[in-house]
Amino acid sequence: MSSDNVPKAASPGRTVRRRTDADLDACVAALAEVHTRDGYPVNWPDRPARWLAPSAQLAAWVAELDGRVVGHAGLSRSEAGDAAAALWSRREGVRADQAAVVGRLFVAPAARGHGLGALLMAQARRPVSAACTPYWTSWNPTVRRWPSTSGSAGSCSTPSSSGGAPGRP
């Protein structure tokens, strides 16, 4: 494991690591490929790099295949209007503003089939801090096989922030 507690892939060429600002252009390029092929996100954002780094974001990771950024996952605080997080919170008896939401999850079409989506989900499910464990994941209908570990239980004690785009993936 790396210093960020990110599991390294079992096979050569696959890596998941914390996203840096320098990765955003490559992430936007991969997102554009996903949008063209799969229609995710449904509405292309005016500022895709900003969409990938919302103010409520707690952490984000990239997947690399042979040194090239080909995937992304983010973990954000739940915001007003996150309907699925609110429903999950009511069911579990946890306040919605304590939800940590896994989203902005995608892998470029040409890089699929290498287990990178599962590696990103495994990382996103890990606590970002002692006070925060994700427990709700957004669903992207273009994902053909969802890891059986999605939808883990937990909470995030960081305060909810205002702004952002409620209900966005």
Image (cartoon, grey):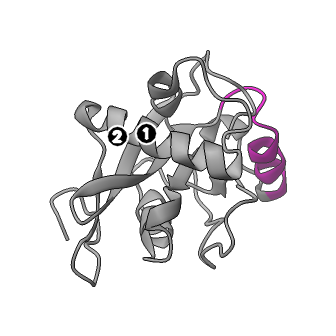
Check disc 2 and give the amino acid type: Ala
Q: Which residue lies furthest to the left in this view?
A: 3
| Residue drawn at x 45%, y 68% as measured from the top left | 122
Quadrant hosting residue 20: top left
Quadrant hosting residue 11: bottom left
Mark 1 near mark 2, Cβ–Cβ under 8 Å? yes
Q: In this view, does 147 lie above or below 30?
A: below
Q: Which residue lies furthest to the bottom in this view?
A: 10
The crowding category of the residue bearing disc 2, from other C-alpha atoms within 10 Å (few below 14, some 14 to 19, many at least 20), is some
Q: Left or right of 46: which side holds 93?
A: right
**Membership of 157 in magenta stretch:** no
Kindly identify which numbered label has been placed on residue 155: none
Q: Where is residue 83 in the image (x, y as percent from the top left)?
A: 82, 39
Q: Left or right of 58: which side holds 33?
A: right
Q: Position of residue 21 (x, y in %)?
A: 27, 30
**Membership of 82 in magenta stretch:** yes
Does any portion of residue 153 appear in the rendered image? yes
Residue carrying label 1: 29
Q: Is residue 143 above or below residue 93?
A: below
Residue carrying label 2: 26
Q: What stretch is highlighted in magenta?
A: 79-91
Give the secondary structure at mark 1: helix
Q: Position of residue 120 (x, y in %)?
A: 44, 62
Check disc 1 and give the amino acid type: Ala
Along the viewing direction, whichever of 142 and 3 lies nearer the viewer: 142
